[in-house]
Amino acid sequence: MPNVVKIELENGGRQCLADISGVTGVKKGSRVIIDADNCIEMAKVLSNPVDMQTITVELRKISRLATEADCAKAEEYAAKSAEYKQKVKQKVGQYNLDMKLISVTMSIDGKRLLVVYTATERVDFRALVKDLAGMFHTRVEMRQIGEREAASIMGGCGPCGQELCCRRFLGDSSQVSIKMAKLQNMSLNPSKINGVCDKLMCCLQYEYDDYRKVHDALPALDSEIITGFGRGIVVHQDLFRETVAIKFVKDDEECIKEYSLKELAGEDI
């Protein structure tokens, strides 16, 4: 049974789960070392250890706690990240590549330069990588990510005024669909439902299950229903208030009455 913590990689900002089996003293807030791709990366532990019986995702392996020397080296490279990014940006412009740089970071052992970018189409960066390897005298890794992951790395504020959820606590990019917005009767104007990544806001999913349960419990729109007042047609659903509006026709006159789920269950009908 692996002992698992949630971590945030300092080289790229990604969050994932990691196995700490065999390493003592790891707790929330610790800085740890991970062996990866013939180099070492530093990460911050975001949670206390938890024993997990079932694992459905790949776990990173924590090799040890970070030392003061590790932290000093990481801070040294972090201070140079803006300089690295500017140099890479100049080279990208020189080769006229259609890509947007998100971050440029060096592993704490200096064995790998990680270039994270977004692009709408495939980019041939072979000449760029060769040039950068000669410039930085290290191995260069190019990593293409999506707009959601880019937003989680760069950060920012959402329309709610708080720091982006993907930066604050969401680990993996959320699977959000337009049907979530439709079910909640939200405006489908992109400026209202898209986040800073220009994708549907992750928070659309937070209450979706609750809205769906109420939607399934209420009579469907345009369905016919019989109440104590008579036979009518459902013309509106209010998922937030858990009510429906029903249109009745009596003596050639229309009237609309509102009923709650409790009333439709038979208490007041």
Image: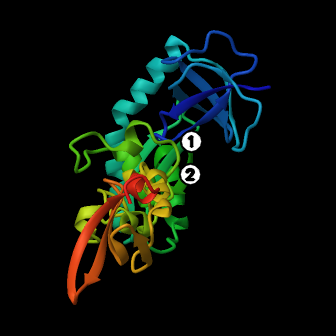
Q: Is residue 137 left or right of residue 63?
A: left
Q: Is residue 119 visible?
A: no
What colour scheme does the image use?
rainbow
Q: Is residue 144 left or right of residue 226?
A: right
Q: Position of residue 141 (x, y in %)?
A: 56, 51
Name the outermost residue toward the top: 25
The label on residue 76 is: none
Question: Label 2 amino acid?
Answer: Glu
Q: CA distance from mark 2 to mark 1?
A: 7 Å
Determine which quarter of the picture holds residue 42: top right
Q: Residue at x 36, y 35 (%)?
A: 80
Label 2 with label 1: CB-CB less than 8 Å:
yes
Query: Mark 2 falls on what kind of element?
Result: strand
Determine which quarter of the picture holds residue 161: top left
Q: Is residue 180 visible?
A: yes
Q: Is residue 216 left or right of residue 199?
A: right
Residue 67 against residue 86 in the figure, above or below: above
Q: Position of residue 125 (x, y in %)?
A: 51, 66
Quadrant including the N terminus: top right
Choose the circle earlier in sequence order: 2 or 1.
Answer: 1
Q: Position of residue 258 (x, y in %)?
A: 28, 63
Question: Label 1 amino acid?
Answer: Arg
Q: Nearer the viewer, residue 200 or 233?
A: 233
In the rendered image, which residue does mark 2 sit on? Answer: 141
Q: Residue at x 44, y 78 (%)?
A: 223
Q: Position of residue 234 (x, y in %)?
A: 36, 75
Query: Mark 1 falls on what kind of element?
Result: strand
Q: Nearer the viewer, residue 240 or 251?
A: 251
Q: Residue at x 29, y 78 (%)?
A: 248
In the rendered image, which residue does mark 1 sit on? Answer: 112
